[in-house]
Amino acid sequence: MRYLPHTPEDIEAMLETVGVESLDDLFSTVPEACRRRSLMKLPSPLTEWELSAHLSSMAQENAAFPACLSFVGAGSYEHHIPATVEAMLRRSEFYTAYTPYQPEMTQGTLQAIYEYQTLVTRLLGLDVANASLYDGASALAEALLMAIRVTRRPRVAVSRAVHPHHRQVVRTYLAPAGYELVELPFQENGTTDLSSMGSGQDLAAVAVQSPNFFGCIEDLGAVADRVHDCGALLVSSFTEPLAFGLLPSPGSRGADIACGEGQSLGIPQSFGGPLLGVFATRDKYVRSIPGRLVGKTVDAEGRQGFVLTLATREQHIRREKATSNICTNNSLCALAAAVYLASLGGRGIRDLARLNYDKAGYLKSRLSDAGFEMAFDAPTFNEFVVKTPAGFENTHARLADGRIVAGVPLAPWYPELENRYLFCVTETKTRDAMDRLVEEMTS
Amino acid sequence: MSEMQGTTGLVLNEPLLWEKGRKGREGFSLPVRDVDPAPLPEDFVVEGPDLPDLSEVDVVRHYTRLSQWNFGVDTGMYPLGSCTMKYNPKLHEVMAGLAGFAGAHPMLPEPLCQGALELMYELQTALAEITGLDAVTLQPAAGAQGELTGMLLIHAYHESRDSKRTKIIVPDTAHGTNPASAALCGYRPVPVASGEEGVLSAETVDRIMDEETAGIMITNPNTLGLFEENVREIAEAVHAKGGLVYGDGANMNAVMGIVDMGRIGVDVLHLNLHKTFSTPHGGGGPGSGPVCVSRALEPFLPIPRIQKLGDRYGLAEDFPQSVGRLQAFYGNFGVMIKAYAYIRSMGAADLKKASRLAVLNANYIKERLKGVYHLPYDRPCMHECVFTDKHLKASKLTTLDVAKRLMDYGFHPPTIYFPLVVQGALMVEPTETESMDEVDRFIDAMHAIAREAEERPDLLLNAPTHCRLRRLDETTAARRPCLKG
């Protein structure tokens, strides 16, 4: 086996040094009753070439761009990723290293993550960002737990227009410790209805997503005023951060914590993971942040350098009182996002966001012309909900046979939204492709 | 010792990203605009975010230079204890990048994602076989989320039996994440000390185990690199009071094909695919932390679960007792591809051999260094061995100085000051992918450093001198945090 470098002579010599007769003897401290009674039953080993063929044929069983024409977003977005992103990620000094515990040997990762933190604060309009969390869903859960710690209040309110999977994860994280979660309904225009919030005196946080799961843009400024009036924190989540190339940042509209999914920023969809949990907040909460932080410092000769810092918040030091249990995060995905944002630049992100907005606008108007009605009338970015006639699931299935995915049905998560489908259009969709979709949907 | 591996070469300085930006440069190929602009609502019109504008060449040089300031497994031996820094096969990166994997949307209709579901199903089956447990979830994103999942499963199990339990036993040799994960479930960690031999005794556990205790979190092999040989009796003591045994499988690399986790009484176990199953650590993730359980805990596994019906694969959510969802989708699929590829290229015999050679390397290092560095537990070890800085006390040097000096010799330092049960720990995990030659070079470097400690302590105190930077001021960084530019 090419990954195991020991020759039989090496093994002999090493066993002799250790003072045992055989490899089996190395396990003398493992009681007989703890051992396997039979060999592991696993498929026979494959050569590099067999494995490559095997996995390639498995990969072909999945529909992907460009063979598949997918108009699905819903928390995972198809964007063009420059070849530079993968080329930089494949620098094995990056991907075969681990958490930069020894800063003198990991300045590359550390500077890159410091730069990532900076780019995130600029994108979200906040003061401080962490080095990454697992995904947008757990980032939202961590944000709410942080709000509970900061305000010492036990309840949180989450909009029903937040991604349903993210809400499920929040429930998983909050329920066992006994924190209460209330859901806020959405209004007819597709944005969050705050009227059921009540006085909100015992609320630690209110979480909304913008653009929300229906693609609708929330009026964050108004939400912030209402939430701050009751002394709660506004947690503004997102699944499509590219929108902030065009929309005001959550920080500029009063969010105390902005968190969400960063997959859009140069990370392949990869059947839902790995993803990137993005997390940013205001300076005054810096010592309550979950996850790793990279800070700037100097070395013994006064030269600029970077280290992991404020570790006293973390699990390996504070144990059960830590701000989070997270250890391994999604550092390489943060690096991808940094390379992607560096490639886009200030002008690029604005142009690309505008192109997404305009293309989505084109499909919206084509579908309207073809007789489909939009379900909500709040402004949207690159996703929107379409009312479809009864029986559209048959059309949807027929199109899927031809590898066209005409949105996702909302009824599994929202029984009241029967026959409503969530569509997404990014820069990967040409006008011809959109015309083809409309034609297929109406034929 | 022959020539010292560590040397200096031409390493280029590189400013911060935004110091390179110039208005008018671009690094992205914007797709052709084939639609008219759609009208923008007024409150949309803000200035875009303040990101630097760079050309493609600027971006590539920037990150290439940064990468050269890093040290990875591909650069050299990285004996970071408890982290299993083994070689990451290159084919796996290419495979995870195949369009059908990297470009698959997680909400595709099931007929359009059969390949991805099959791979996940087969990986679950293999992990169940390797651990000796019955059912698997691949959803947790890393070890700590796997631990949290394990705690949630235990919590849900007790709740389903109307059993209110508030505590959990956590040995002093546990990983740092264990108490933090338990706390998220409202469990108060009850510490328990390991005995003189560095392992737990069943009597100690039996004494503190009661009917308010949900179970025990036990790392086996433990963080001293020792096999918890009383584990079966410990499990019996915990089970007798209605508790469950959580196994931290971070150290599974020592025992593949050797230990049966089901047989020793583990009810729930997390694995780290980025440790045992060769997926890269990515500079701090993404990892993947599957959780394997016994039949009794299967109803509580996170949703969605992958099912096989005939020759078709599907996702199922209808498990009313499930702890719920842990991830936005199904976990780190891109990482699972690499772990699956590893298992398929190794097969049963070579996985077992990998564990045996990992244990051989660690014992060889232990034997050859034990006279030179203080070895607190002189017993056969598993995949890692732990030394302390006791012998250095006379020269007023510490574990940190040894670690920094190792860099000059061209090695990543071991894990230091962990586990906490010994003073000034140096935790060495060579893994099986280091050859005897490389291990010998490491041992020679450690010997040379021990000599330097006596003869030229300044070499240790001033180390590293061959890295791009000297020691960094971590105190100021924490006192006056500067977290963005």
Image (cartoon, rainbow, N blue to C red):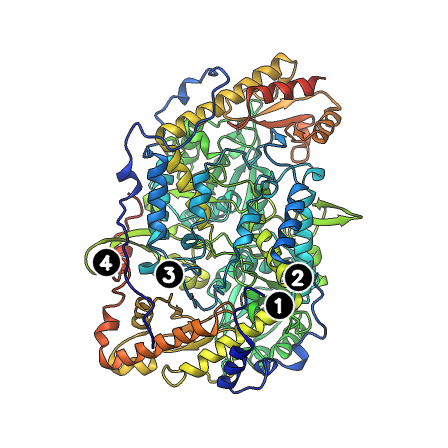
Q: Mark 3 belongs to which amino acid?
A: Tyr
Residue that lies at the very extreme toward the top in this rendered image: A369
CA gap, disc 3 and disc 4: 15 Å
Residue A61, quarter of picture: top right
Q: Which residue is drawn at 62% across and 51% down?
A: A52
Which one is in front in this view, the residue at disc 1 or the one at disc 3?
1
CA gap, disc 2 and disc 4: 49 Å
CA gap, disc 2 and disc 3: 36 Å
Instruction: Name the residue tied to disc 4.
Output: A299
Mark 2 or 4, nearer chain start:
2
Q: Residue at x 68, y 79 (%)?
A: A33
Q: Mark 2 belongs to which amino acid?
A: Pro
Instruction: Name the residue tied to disc 3.
Output: A101
Foreground residue, A71 or A160?
A: A71
Q: Residue at x 62, y 55 (%)?
A: B340
Residue B459, quarter of picture: bottom left
CA gap, disc 1 and disc 3: 31 Å
Circles 1 and 2: CB atoms closer than 8 Å: yes
For label 4, the crowd category at 10 Å Cα-Cα, with few meaning under 14, some 14 to 19 and many 20 or more, is some
Q: Mark 1 belongs to which amino acid?
A: Asp
Asked if residue A403 can be seen in this view, the reply is yes
Residue B449, label in figure: none
CA gap, disc 4 and disc 1: 44 Å
Respond whether the residues carrying marks 2 and 3 are from the same subunit: yes
